[in-house]
């Protein structure tokens, strides 16, 4: 086994595998067994043996995060969601706030799609609602599952929070479409008839579309000019240092609908990069 270890350290994994397969003790925890598993994974050899050993280690030996990640990766490829869920639970028993495994657990529950999954999905939705993501690829995965599952507020808020990322902006448009078609309770994407504090205004001036957040802290005195006006109003804006101009109120809305319209306007630009038809 010393020779097998040498092959392993030299990254000659197939040579290491040949020796480990003959001589490694698979019934007790040992570093050669760990190396054997790792070699099988890297060399993409004997997936049946690899899966058997990974499960055996998980059920009988010490907690090894790296081996759990390997086993989870293989189960995703094989779409073995029930086994993948078991792996997630094993990891989360040690670290119940791990973003990668919570995201994967949500994916498993969504794929299994049985009645008992609903409460666990609800719990994960609550966790991710105020979570700060460290792995960018998890953002659309988590948000899309939540939106498709009817957790519109949680899913849309995640997408809204990370809408500076281009791939998330497209997913946000898709989510607004699903929400508009499926939600019975219109908590989001609201339109208003009158401009009040806290709303968002879409207006046209000199042929250009602009957006404005009605926030008292905003230093722009446009806030006072807009306050109280209604949809369709045309307002003359007077400026001391520049030429007066007029604006027409096109839409009064919440932040979610405002972002939708901003992305939609951006997508009209040929260099936006958004995959819109």
Image: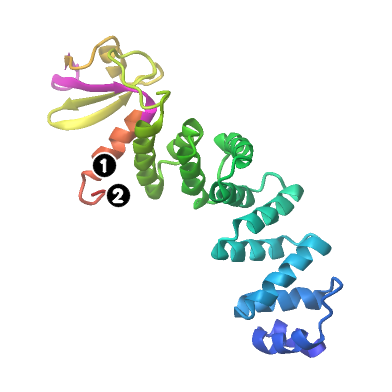
Mark number, residue 266: 1
Residue ranking furthest to the front: 115
Residue 172 in percent (x, y) is at 38, 40
Rendered view: 196 above or below 165: above
The magenta segment is 236-256
Classify mark 1: residues with Cα within 10 Å, few (<14), some (14-19) or many (20+): some
Residue at 57% x, 38% y is 128
Classify mark 2: residues with Cα within 10 Å, few (<14), some (14-19) or many (20+): some
Q: Secondary structure at mark 1?
A: helix
Residue 10 in percent (x, y) is at 68, 85
Is residue 25 part of the magenta span, yes or no?
Answer: no
Residue at 65% x, 66% y is 70
Coloring scheme used: rainbow
Q: Is residue 190 left or right of residue 245?
A: right
Residue of label 2: 274
Rounded to the nearest whole Å, what is the CA distance between mark 1 and mark 2?
A: 8 Å
Rendered view: 43 above or below 235: below
Residue 86 in percent (x, y) is at 69, 54
Residue at 66% x, 64% y is 71
Is residue 254 part of the magenta span, yes or no?
Answer: yes
């Amino acid at each position: 086994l010393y020779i097998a270890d040498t092959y392993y350290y030299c990254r000659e994994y197939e040579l290491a595998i040949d020796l480990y397969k003959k001589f490694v003790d698979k019934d007790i925890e040992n570093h050669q067994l760990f190396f054997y598993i790792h070699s099988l994974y890297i060399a993409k050899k004997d997936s049946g043996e690899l899966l058997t050993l990974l499960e055996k280690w998980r059920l009988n030996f010490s907690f090894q995060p790296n081996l759990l990640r390997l086993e989870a990766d293989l189960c995703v490829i094989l779409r073995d969601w029930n086994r993948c869920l078991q792996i997630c639970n094993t990891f989360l028993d040690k670290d119940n706030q791990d973003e990668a495994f919570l995201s994967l657990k949500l994916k498993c529950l969504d794929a299994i799609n049985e009645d008992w999954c609903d409460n666990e999905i609800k719990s994960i939705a609550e966790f991710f609602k105020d979570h700060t993501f460290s792995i960018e690829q998890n953002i659309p995965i988590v948000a899309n599952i939540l939106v498709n599952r009817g957790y519109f507020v949680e899913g849309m808020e995640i997408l809204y929070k990370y809408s500076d990322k281009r791939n998330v902006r497209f997913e946000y448009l898709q989510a607004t479409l699903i929400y508009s078609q499926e939600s019975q309770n219109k908590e989001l994407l609201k339109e208003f008839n009158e401009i009040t504090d806290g709303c968002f205004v879409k207006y046209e001036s000199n042929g250009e579309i602009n957006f404005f957040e009605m926030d008292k802290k905003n230093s722009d005195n446009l806030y006072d000019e807009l306050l109280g006006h209604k949809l369709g109003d045309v307002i003359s804006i007077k400026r001391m240092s520049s030429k007066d101009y007029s604006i027409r109120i096109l839409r009064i809305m919440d932040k979610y609908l405002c972002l939708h319209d901003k992305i939609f306007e951006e997508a009209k630009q040929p260099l936006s990069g958004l995959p819109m038809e």
